[in-house]
Amino acid sequence: MSSPKRYDRIAFVASAVAEAQQALAALVELYGNRDPAEADVVVALGGDGLMLQTLHRHMRTGKPIYGMHRGTVGFLMNEFSTHDLHARLAAARESVIHPLLMRAIDVHGAIQHHHAINEVALFRQTHQAARLRILIDDRERMAELIADGVLVATPAGSTAYNLSAQGPIIPINAALLALTPISPFRPRRWRGALLPNTASVVIEVLESEKRPVAAVADHDEARDVRRVEVLSDKSISMRMLFDPGHSLEERILSEQFGY
């Protein structure tokens, strides 16, 4: 049996809300605060928004991230406590996630690349519904989707906007992506698809000048897109730490039973 990992050097980050700042002050007094570059682990104090920011900031470092809930939504966070943090970190279970890579081409030919941990979503920019064409691995799967938009979600993001759009919840270790329409008009009864996480998804915007569409990778937005390519970026692995019994796998499973 392998010995528990030691996370002696801790870097704390916190959201700007008073609750998180108070927690930061208390924890720094007890455990000190290292620069993230020198730390064994980054502890994020806030809500899911801060966790996503922290994951993005440390995406390429391989640094483990442990969140404690001091914000609004805390699906990705552990319970807050100042007690025996070193022991909690040593006992924590690790979940490894991979981001999506979005390549968006706008109507002027400009290209933007962004990563998403939760989802890549396309939205109509005006009162008119978007007209979209969907290709999977270079094969046309839907010639025309008329909707407010469409999104591609990771397992980690399947309980976020994807779930609100009536998409499926995906177990964290499943090698799947969710392709989910947003308020579809035609075909009205299409509820989306589950795709292998090796799939290359291409969404083309039809009538892009008349019906402009924006593409958003978590919080990075590209406006007036005409083509968006999405794939899982296996070259990046992010390590999230969760208390035993409260792993991301367990949370996603519990979400399917309504608690």
Image (cartoon, grey):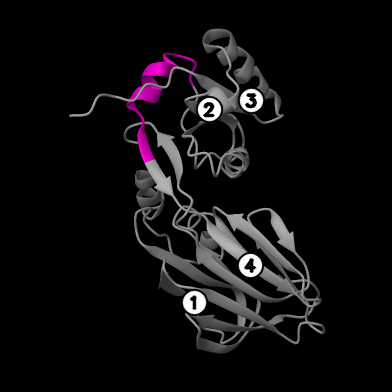
Q: SS class of the residue under badge 1?
A: loop
Q: Amino acid at mark 2?
A: Val
State the separation of the CA atoms marked 3 and 2: 12 Å
Mark 1–mark 3 contact, CB under 8 Å?
no
Q: SS class of the residue under badge 4?
A: strand
Q: Which residue is mark 4?
A: 103
Mark 3 vs mark 2: in front: 2
Q: Which residues are magenta?
A: 81-94
Q: Which residue is mark 3?
A: 20
Mark 2–mark 4 contact, CB under 8 Å?
no
Mark 1 vs mark 2: in front: 2
Q: SS class of the residue under badge 3?
A: helix
Specify the quadrant of the image occupied by residue 131. bottom right
Where is residue 31? Give x, y as percent. Answer: 52, 12
Residue 185 vertical placement versus 238 (above, below): below
Mark 2 neighbour class, 10 Å CA radius: few under 14, some 14 to 19, many 20 or more: many
Q: Which residue is mark 2?
A: 43
Q: Amino acid at mark 1?
A: Arg
Residues 142 and 8: in front is 8
Specify the quadrant of the image occupied by residue 177. bottom left
State the separation of the CA atoms marked 1 and 3: 39 Å
State the separation of the CA atoms marked 4 and 3: 35 Å
Q: SS class of the residue under badge 2?
A: strand
Where is residue 227? Give x, y as percent. Answer: 67, 77
**Of the residues under marks 3 and 2, which one precedes in the sequence?**
3
**Of the residues under marks 1 and 4, which one precedes in the sequence?**
4
Q: Is residue 82 magenta?
A: yes
